[in-house]
């Protein structure tokens, strides 16, 4: 037997309902793009634009050795300086940066009598948290890799307590008088220069605009 007809047609979707759904779909798509950009694309592709690097240089006071003035601070008699690097990730999330086995580097240049900057000292250390190898999210191979840098400020020691940047040679004689310019690098990103005047040295030419990266 057939069901008796009610005489009512199936409910049709009104144009107003279709117009209401279209803006919601557009908002969902836009929100997805924003989340993808903020949570993945920017931290992974443009991470270095959010990271700043700063050198932390501290004189190691001693009863003998040259006087040293670091970035205009009071003069201190010291046998060496300890150097760390501060990495400031200003993005609210962790970012991914490419790296190499020597993650943190430091160098000091002295301007000679001809005005040329000459490398006086350099060192570098690795980072145990850095990933290396072909499965790294950045780079790949035995010498490249990536590291996840957390949001906020982290500090990494470049010269530890037993191995500072010595201001005296093996005989105890002070290094050449003058203004040394220090710079540190983290994940390939350089810091502003830190001037260090040794034994009352001056530089009539003033600070250079930048330093060349140390070799190696």
Image (tube, rainbow, N blue to C red):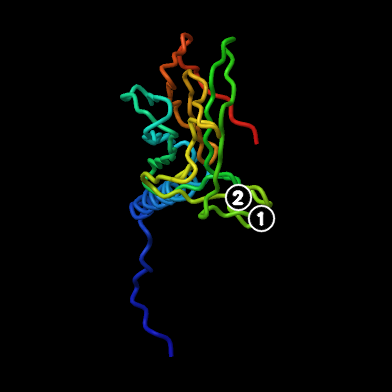
The structure residue drawn at horizontal position 61% and vertical position 54%, both measured from the top left corner, is: 132
At mark 2, the secondary structure is strand
The structure residue drawn at horizontal position 52% and vertical position 50%, both measured from the top left corner, is: 127
Determine which of the numbered discs, if any, sits on residue 145 in the image: 2
The earlier-in-sequence mark between 2 and 1 is 1
Left or right placement of residue 51 versus residue 74 in this view: right
Give how far across and how far down residue 172 sits, in percent.
50, 31
50 or 8, which lies in front? 50
Quarter-of-image position of residue 206: top left
196 or 106, which lies in front? 196
Mark 2, Cα crowd under 10 Å, few <14 / some 14-19 / many 20+, is many
Q: Is residue 189 above or below residue 140?
A: above
Q: Work out which quarter of the rendered image holds the N terminus and state it.
A: bottom left
At mark 1, the secondary structure is loop
Give how far across and how far down residue 6 sits, in percent.
33, 76
Give how far across and how far down residue 55 sits, in percent.
43, 34
Give how far across and how far down residue 197 sits, in percent.
42, 21
The structure residue drawn at horizontal position 48% and vertical position 28%, both measured from the top left corner, is: 182
Give how far apart the Cα atoms at labels 2 and 1 are. Answer: 8 Å
Q: Is residue 214 above or below residue 204?
A: below
The structure residue drawn at horizontal position 38% and vertical position 68%, both measured from the top left corner, is: 10
Q: Is residue 63 above or below residue 7?
A: above
Residue occupied by mark 1? 134
Determine which of the numbered discs, if any, sits on residue 192 in the image: none
66 or 38, which lies in front? 66
196 or 172, which lies in front? 172
């Amino acid at each position: 037997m057939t069901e008796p007809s009610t005489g009512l047609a199936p409910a049709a979707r009104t144009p107003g309902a279709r117009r209401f759904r279209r803006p919601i779909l557009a908002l969902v798509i836009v929100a997805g793009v924003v989340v993808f950009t903020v949570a993945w694309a920017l931290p992974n592709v443009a991470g270095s634009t959010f990271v700043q690097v700063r050198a932390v240089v501290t004189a190691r006071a001693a009863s003998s050795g040259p006087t040293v003035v670091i970035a205009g601070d009071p003069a201190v008699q010291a046998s060496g300086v300890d150097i760390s690097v501060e990495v400031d990730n200003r993005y609210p999330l962790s970012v991914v940066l490419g790296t190499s086995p020597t993650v943190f580097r430091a160098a000091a240049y002295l301007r000679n009598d001809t005005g040329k900057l000459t490398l006086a000292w350099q060192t570098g250390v690795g980072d145990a948290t850095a990933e290396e190898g072909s499965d790294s999210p950045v780079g790949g191979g035995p010498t490249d890799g990536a590291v996840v840098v957390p949001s906020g400020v982290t500090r990494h020691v470049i010269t530890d307590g037993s191995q500072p940047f010595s201001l005296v040679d093996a005989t105890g004689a002070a290094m050449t008088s003058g203004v040394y310019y220090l710079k540190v690098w983290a994940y390939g990103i350089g810091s502003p220069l830190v001037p260090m005047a040794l034994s009352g040295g001056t530089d009539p030419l003033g600070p250079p605009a930048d330093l060349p990266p140390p070799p190696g």
